[in-house]
Amino acid sequence: MPATAPDPTGDPAGLVVGVDIGGTGTRFVAMDLERKILARHAVPTPARFTSGSATDFLAGQINFLVQGEPIAAIGIGASGPVDSEGIIRNPDTLPAFTGEPVVSELTTRFKTRVRIDNDAVCAALAEQRVGAAAGSASLLHITLGTGIGSCLLLDGRPLRGADGMHPEAGHITVRHAPVACYCGRDACWEQAASRQALQRAAAAVLGRDPDDRNAVADLAENATRGDAAATRMFREYGLAVAVGLGTLLAAYRPNTVILGGSAAEHLNLYREEIQSYLAGLGPWIHHARLAATHLDDFGGAIGAAHLTLANI
């Protein structure tokens, strides 16, 4: 179950704040109790704090967002693992937040209920409630971002492990992963099919630095104009996504698959490769409806806000 600090007030009045702590950026939204988004804000995710703490950072950004309005609840999605006590355990992509008691400390500071879960759960909740899978009873959400997040929702409830933690299915083994992963696998899906992997591949085709964040968009533009090298690279990326997705479809058999994260913006350039590969797997998988997210980069923060209102 997601960790929740006790509500010290019991007072539901005010804004619901959603926070999405990703490996690259941290996003904040303020939502009213009718689920209308009133404000949003994004900043780069700190890799370390030379002064202050993770709680100081989050509290400062939340205060900037709400501008003095009362807060009814705070929901946080974080790039996992997030343990059953609500502590982030991700030294590889969230070193500044790992091991920090942000839930209990934010509860004390704001005197309101604070809830945390894996960011994949929050992204899936957003899609199931207000996004591309609204009302779906069986949803597999895949986030193609700095890493790969995945969440299976059945009747609105996420699949969890026996220890209460969220499965890290982005770290399944696949073929042809270009580099070893920090998770310990030499051939990990995250290193083959994350947005970071797409960025590295796009930069290589364009002859740019691997950290060039414009490389994917620029190569996508080339592909839409019919450039052969660009088209081939996106097809290869689609195959990398499909290989891991095929394993999850065999294991979970959902009705709907939603791809989120910034790499999903270009699904039209590699959808055919995914569908062609999956079609070859026959009855070993359930052939789910595949769609890109209808939400923008704030979908995870919106889901984190909904987390505070969900009975999961």
Image (cartoon, helix red, strand yellow):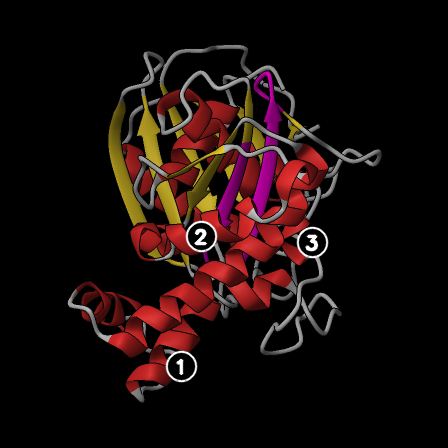
Q: CA distance from mark 2 to mark 3?
A: 18 Å
Q: Is residue 71 visible?
A: no
Q: Residue at x 42, y 76 (%)?
A: 201
Q: Is residue 193 visible?
A: yes
Disc number for residue 311: none
- Give residue 302's quadrant in the image: top left
Disc number for residue 89: 3
Does the CB distance between marks 1 and 3 fall below 8 Å? no
Three-letter amino acid code at the position of disc 3:
Arg
Dot 1 falls on a residue whose secondary structure is loop
Residue 90 in the image: above or below residue 37? below
Q: Residue at x 31, y 89 (%)?
A: 207
Q: CA distance from mark 1 to mark 2?
A: 29 Å
Front-most of residues 93 and 160: 160
Residue 310, image x, y percentages: 54, 17
Residue 242, image x, y percentages: 54, 54
Disc number for residue 57: 2
On whether residue 177 falls in the magenta region, the answer is: no
Three-letter amino acid code at the position of disc 1:
Pro
Which region is colored magenta?
140-157
Q: Residue at x 36, y 13 (%)?
A: 33
Does the CB distance between marks 2 and 3 fall below 8 Å? no
| Residue topped by disc 1 | 210
Residue furthest out toward the right = 162
On whether residue 141 falls in the magenta region, the answer is: yes
- Give residue 232's quadrant in the image: bottom left
Residue furthest out toward the bottom = 207
Mark earlier in primary sequence (2, 3): 2
> Is 180 left, or right, of 56 in this rendering?
right
